[in-house]
Image (tube, rainbow, N blue to C red):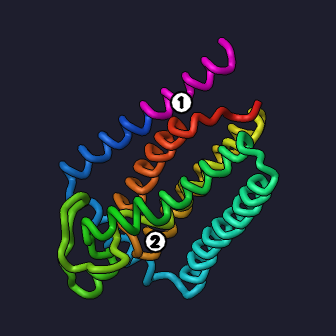
Amino acid sequence: MDLASNSASKFNLSLMFLTIATIGAVVFFAYNPDFDLWLSTKLYHFYYRQGSWYGQFLYVLRRLNFWLLYLSLAFILYKTIKLICLKSWQKLKPYLFILLSYFMAGVVVSDWLIKPFFKRARPGQVIQLGKTYTAPFEIGTECQKNCSFISGEVAAATAFLSLLVLLPSQYRRPAALIMLFWIILISAVRMAQIGHYLSDTLFAALLVGIAMLALKIIFNIPHKK
């Protein structure tokens, strides 16, 4: 199998996996609409049984995700500007793909489209303040800004996967595994902080993953050999 066929096969498998996982998640939450609230309530009681170290530890991990985003974004912007100045248009494509992935994940998908549309109150607001709980994909009325569904921070963590296009093939698999672990960790952190439901984090990763695959088709970007 040549490199092009192998890349196409991996792409198709990735798209198939994300599609099946998304459908499976939709079906699960359709049959278990209160699972989010049940899990968040358990995590809420666990959080307040711990000492101050627990909240501080979660805070540090959350801030680290922001710093990774800022540092990687600064690097990509630097490389993009440099390549534009050099008029190296072919080498520019992967960096534009990464920039659009970051922008799409952190702003368009989460903050501009999904959050203001579904208006889902965060678990902390529901449990502590008595706001109305809404199931995944149910449109709420009690959140007007910075709502729960979907998680912008998990969406941003998922966008780190776009950096894989810059890596040679021998480093791609271990880097992907590290990034997947980080996505799961940040998802767990946001749920543990009672900032998001399970479905907020799960659908953030799945939808951004599918959107990035669509961007990759548009940009027609091959991996480095």
| Residue 105 disc label | none
Q: Distance between the residues labelled 2 and 1?
A: 33 Å
The residue nearer to you, when weighing 139 against 23, is 139
Which residue position holds label 2? Answer: 192
> Is 221 displayed left or right of 198 in the figure?
right
Label 1 Cα neighbours within 10 Å, binned few <14 / some 14-19 / many ≥20: some
- In this picture, is 91 found above or below 52? above
Residue at the top extreme of this rendering? 1
> Is 112 displayed left or right of 142 in the figure?
right
- The residue range painted magenta reads 1-16
Provide residue 184's location: percent of width, then percent of height: 53, 56
Q: Residue at x 74, y 60 (%)?
A: 81
Label 2 Cα neighbours within 10 Å, binned few <14 / some 14-19 / many ≥20: many
- Mark 2 vs mark 1, foreground winner is 1
Q: Which residue is drawn at 27% across and 80% down?
A: 144
The residue nearer to you, when weighing 54 against 26, is 26
- What is the quadrant of the N terminus in the image? top right
Majority secondary structure in the magenta region? helix
> Is 174 displayed left or right of 97 in the figure?
right
The residue nearer to you, when weighing 139 against 64, is 139
Disc 2, disc 1: CB below 8 Å? no
> Is 85 displayed left or right of 136 in the figure?
right
Assign a secondary structure to mark 2: helix
- What is the quadrant of the C terminus in the image? top right
